[in-house]
Image: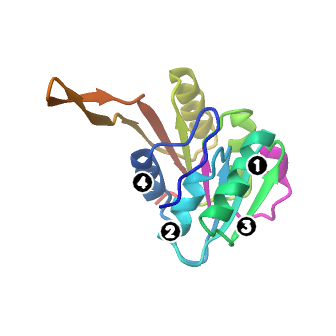
Amino acid sequence: MTELLHVSGGPTKPEIIAVSLSKLDLMDGCRFFDIGCGTGAVSIEASKMVRDISIVAMDARDEAIDVTKKNFEAFKITNAQVLSGESSQILEMQDEGSIDCAFIGGTKNISRVLEVLALKRARSIVVNAVRIETVVNVINKMKELDIFDEVLHVIVSRGAPITGETMFKPENPVYIVVGRTNKE
């Protein structure tokens, strides 16, 4: 089995990826943007879920870009672009309507990133955050842009041995904030 290479702050835990991707409503033919891609783990899982997906992974950190490229190569991800730079600037260069779904794992310049995604009419947006201040800022910004849909607080605990038995050790809780431009 291929092992995912790591960078600081990642990768996103598999359970969190599963919930986040389910909230994006991925479908065949969609253009998926992985903003603050870190290790590329979210993109790798998205490519397993949807056959005909076009992935654009981006990060401002050189280390993350290098690791994502290596992970994409190891997992044979061939339907992806990996872009280095400030996310809002990269997103601004995209055509309106060309961004179907966006996963945001990095929160640098998050307000501007959300503004651009709303302007470009991204169908669904999922933000993962661990800091409550970030969650409040994201919810408020999404409400201002009239794209807020829901927020989830997800806590995963893993079994661990203790004196011959099993206990549960909690992972860091994660907030998943969901936005939609075509709310029904």
In whole angstroms, how far apart are the C-alphas of marks 2 and 4?
Answer: 11 Å
In whole angstroms, how far apart are the C-alphas of marks 4 and 1?
Answer: 24 Å
Read off the magenta span: 87-104
Q: What amino acid type is highlighted by mark number 1?
A: Asp
Cβ–Cβ under 8 Å for marks 4 and 1: no
In whole angstroms, how far apart are the C-alphas of marks 2 and 1?
Answer: 21 Å
| Of pointers 4 and 1, the one earlier in the residue sequence | 4
Disc 1 crowd rating (10 Å Cα; few below 14, some 14-19, many 20+) is: some
- Name the spot of residue 59 as percent of width and height, x first: 75, 45
Q: At x 72% / y 32%, what residue is drawn? A: 108
| Of pointers 4 and 3, the one earlier in the residue sequence | 4
Closest to the camera, between mark 2 and mark 3, is 2
Q: At x 76% / y 49%, what residue is drawn? A: 66
Q: Which residue is mark 4?
A: 18
Q: Which residue is mark 1?
A: 66
Q: Classify 47 as above or below 165.
A: below
Q: What amino acid type is highlighted by mark number 4?
A: Ala
Element type where label 3 sits in the image: loop
Closest to the camera, between mark 4 and mark 3, is 4
